[in-house]
Amino acid sequence: QLQLLESGPGLVKPSETLSLTCTISGGSISSGSFCWGWVRQAPGEGLEWIASVYYTGDIYYNPSLKRRVTVSVDTSKNQFSLKLRAVTAADTALYYCARHVMVRGIRTPRWFDSWGQGTLVSVTS
Amino acid sequence: EKEMTQFPATLSVSPGESATLSCRASQSVGINLAWYQQKRGQAPRLLIYGASTRAIGIPARFSGSGSGTDFTLTISSLQSEDFAVYYCHQYNNWPPWTFGQGTKVEIK
């Protein structure tokens, strides 16, 4: 059974870089049927998609965050990572990694079918 | 950016009754719409994709319908475990993929 586990610091100072890793077990990051995504949820708010990455390195970004976001894949460790630069209090959120389904014949990923439990990141001095 | 509007924001329903949740897109998304359930303190769970296809393991009391700009999630005969927040998600046009703000289904 697929499991996704987010890891990283729970506290980040303003203007610094938030770094998270998602470790996949029970499945392969190199599966051609899936992208791997990051979604966040500010306290009491809804869901915001951040970015998704294919094992080949193809990346899909939310334009509103693109200039601050880096995502990458490490196939040897079955992990993918998120870096968000120049954080502010507005970046305080629960960060989820999720599996983003690819459908044959369609270039971009579709729905999220499996999610990690999330990790809370607070931006505070 | 395709905006997704969910209504009502909160729905009060008695156990055993049905609940109808709505999601409206600012532009047509075809049938490229998913629904998720999020219980307090938990990650979202995929319920429906392709506007009407139930995900693996999702009970038949959950049904989705609609196309274009108007979509509905119906939960028939609500069980105690169904009280949660529900989100719609359009994946028709990127960027970005967007979610609605959620509908909270609470016990009446």
Image: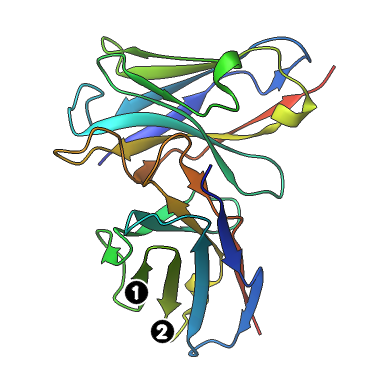
User: Residue A64: percent from the left, percent from the top?
Assistant: 60, 28
Position above or below: A44 against A71: below
- Name the residue carrying label 2: B76
Which amino acid does the dot numbered 2 rest on?
Ser
User: Residue B107: percent from the left, percent from the top?
Assistant: 63, 80
> Which is nearer the eye, B33 or B27?
B27
**Front tag of 1 and 2:** 1
Q: Is the residue under label 2 in contact with that under label 1 (CB below 8 Å)?
A: yes
How many numbered circles are shown? 2
Could you tell me which chain the residue with mark 1 belongs to? Answer: B
Position above or below: B38 against B92: below
Answer with the quarter of the image where residue A34 lies: top left
Q: Residues within 10 Å of mark 2 (few under 14, many from 20)?
A: some
**Which image quadrant: the C terminus of chain A?**
top right
Residue sitting at 75 percent across and 30 percent down? A90
Asked which secondary structure carries label 1, the reply is: strand
Residue sitting at 43 percent across and 69 percent down? B71
Residue lying furthest left: A104
Residue sitting at 17 percent across and 28 percent down? A32
Could you tell me which chain the residue with mark 2 belongs to? Answer: B
Residue lying furthest right: A125
- Name the residue carrying label 1: B63
> Which is nearer the eye, A24 or B105?
B105
Position above or below: A69 against B5: above
**Which image quadrant: the N terminus of chain A?**
top left
Q: Which mark is residue A11?
A: none
Asked which secondary structure carries label 2, the reply is: loop
Which amino acid does the dot numbered 1 rest on?
Ser
Residue sitting at 45 percent across and 34 percent down? B95
> Which is nearer the eye, B27 or B101?
B27
User: Residue B20: percent from the left, percent from the top?
Assistant: 49, 79
